[in-house]
Amino acid sequence: MSAQENDWDLLIHPKAEKELAELQIKDRKFVDRAIIELGKNPRTGDIQWLKPTHLNMYRKRIGRWRIFFMVEPEKRIVLITGIRLRTSTTY
């Protein structure tokens, strides 16, 4: 998936695409809006850098959901790597 109207190229890993497809419609709309925001600016919202061992890996918190993504600033690419419901074992 690539969004042309965004400032950043937005890519979704096949695993994350599957996780997104499995969401209920209500949750999917909620998560879709957050993904569109990432394509406009991956540094806004409740963003957390994930430990130094993950280099450019981040997570965005949206309610009870977490979107995990990588950023390649030189190429202006955001790669969504996972979409998960927040539990005690999410991280």
Image (cartoon, rainbow, N blue to C red):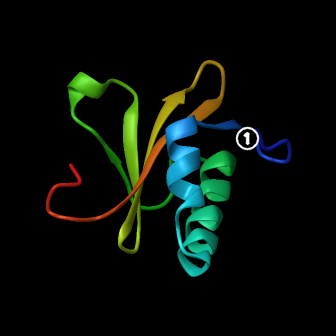
Please say if 42 is above or below 63. Answer: above
Crowd tier of the residue under label 1, counting other residues whose Cα lies within 10 Å: few below 14, some 14–19, many 20 or above:
few
What residue do we see at 29% from left, 27% from top?
54
Farthest residue, direction right? 5
Name the amino acid, label 1. Met
The answer to which quarter of the image holds residue 21 is bottom right
Query: Which residue occupies the foreground of this view, 15 or 74?
Result: 15
What residue do we see at 21% from left, 49% from top?
91
Q: Position of residue 52 (x, y in %)?
A: 23, 26
Left or right side of 35 for 81: left
Farthest residue, direction bottom? 26
SS assignment at label 1 = loop
What residue do we see at 16% from left, 55% from top?
89
Q: Position of residue 90 (x, y in %)?
A: 23, 54
Q: Position of residue 50 (x, y in %)?
A: 27, 39
**Whether residue 13 is visible:** no
Which residue was labeled with disc 1? 1
Please say if 69 is above or below 19. Answer: above
Q: Position of residue 63 (x, y in %)?
A: 40, 74
What residue do we see at 52% from left, 67% from top?
23
Left or right side of 63 for 22: right
Query: Which residue occupies the foreground of this view, 78 or 21?
Result: 21
The answer to which quarter of the image holds residue 57 is top left
**Whether residue 47 is visible:** yes
Farthest residue, direction top? 74
Q: Quadrant where the N terminus lies?
A: top right
Left or right side of 74 for 2: right
Left or right side of 63 for 37: right
